[in-house]
Image (cartoon, helix red, strand yellow):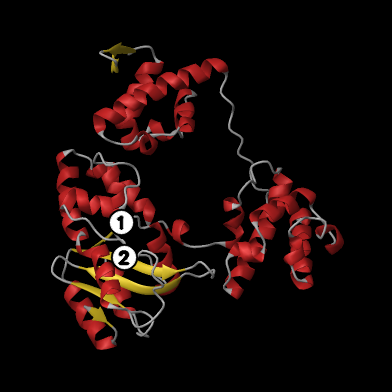
Amino acid sequence: MYITDQQSLEAFCERASKARVIAVDTEFLRERTYHPKLCLIQVATSEESAAIDPLVIDDLSALVALLVDENITKVFHACTQDLEVIQDSLGCVPSPVFDTQLAASFLGQRLQIGYGALVEAYCKVKLPKAESLTDWSRRPLDPDQLRYAEDDVIYLPRIYDEMITQLARKDRLSWLAPEMAALTDATRVTRDPEEAYLHLKRSSSLTRRQLAVAREVCAWRERVAAQRDLPRKWIVSDEVLVETCRRTPRTVERLRGVRGTEQLSDRDARALVSAVDKGLSCDPARYPYPKVVHRDRPSADMESVLDLMYAMLRIVSDQSGIAPQLIASRDDLHDLALGREDARLASGWRHELAGEKLERLLAGEVGLTVKDGHLELL
């Protein structure tokens, strides 16, 4: 159903509140704005589905209550952007959450499998993608658009049930639980201007003092972009900010020497220089410089060890059906080889699945051999 009025929304949410599982998806636009524009919210139980129109309904509190009900599992596919949009537009983070894309990677499917491929694998239905580039902000929505929107949720309750059964059979529910919980961590779905520099591209070469400048200029850009509701790069690009942090100009004239700053108004140029000055003038004793994370480059011998560890990781991946990238990165292997206590492979499901075997390999207790053209454990 297509819900465009308060009474219908409240009635649907009342019925859905009795379900143990609901599927959720969103349609939004953000190409030309800082804040994503929520255009449609699709919700489905195992019995009915609804496309809820937030552009014509003023009060969505009934939907918010449904999304935060801890007794109802909210099923998404690739939920990261949906959670961010819901947090930005509705002011809540749905919980608990089950992400079918993440769960699929624990069940032998490829990493980051698409929704269409998942529906085809579990429900034997091939979905059309004719509406994938729709402008969802335009009204009225036609029947094809609403059918496409409905397709994004109606299969998820069934897929969830099958996945839970498979995960329980493989005894992997406990592995998945902390990964799912991490998805709703508030730090992942909210924007803190003071942390924006952590996402600045090509900033790895900056010194700690330059990163202190980056912290201030990125926070300035974040606040301006939010206030004007424009994409960050429309204010100033990452490349220009990184170069600004390297040169640390303290006058507008010197800032204008950075290519790409010509698009800045005089007011913004002065504000950016002020942010640079604030970063340069900060007292590290009271407001510490950001830490520079430099990973040790493995020696030639260690590279060989890591190659052997990765070969074992591939064996574990093939046997378990879990993609090697999900289990561990090469940096994770290096951390384990160095005996670091905080290594991801040293605890939890990763240790149970692969870390313990890798530790035995490093201790010389097991080895690898080739049999019939395939790697096997000795």
**Figure quadrant of residue 368:** top left
Is residue 5 positioned above or below 88 on the image?
A: below
Is residue 243 positioned above or below 351 on the image?
A: below
Residue 147 % position (x, y): 24, 70
Left or right side of 335 for 218: right
Of 325 and 206, the residue lying toward us: 325
Return the mark for residue 77.
1
Return the mark for residue 25.
2
Of 188 and 159, the residue lying toward us: 159
Residue 377 % position (x, y): 29, 16
The quarter of the picture where the N terminus appears is: bottom left
In 3D space, how far apart are the residues under numbered discs 1 and 2 (Cα atoms)?
8 Å
Left or right side of 259 for 287: left
Element class at badge 2: strand
Element class at badge 1: loop
Residue 86 % position (x, y): 39, 68
Q: Earlier in the sequence, mark 1 or mark 2?
A: 2
Amino acid at pointer 1: His
The quarter of the picture where the C terminus appears is: top left
Q: Residue at x 16, y 44 (%)?
A: 166
Q: Look at the numbered discs 1 and 2 and tell me whether their residues touch, using CB distance below 8 Å.
A: yes
Q: Residue at x 65, y 47 (%)?
A: 290
Amino acid at pointer 2: Asp
Q: Around disc 1, counting alpha carbons within 10 Å, would you say few (fewer than 14), some (14 to 19), or many (20 or more)?
A: many
Q: How many marks?
A: 2
Residue 311 % position (x, y): 38, 22
Left or right side of 283 for 253: right
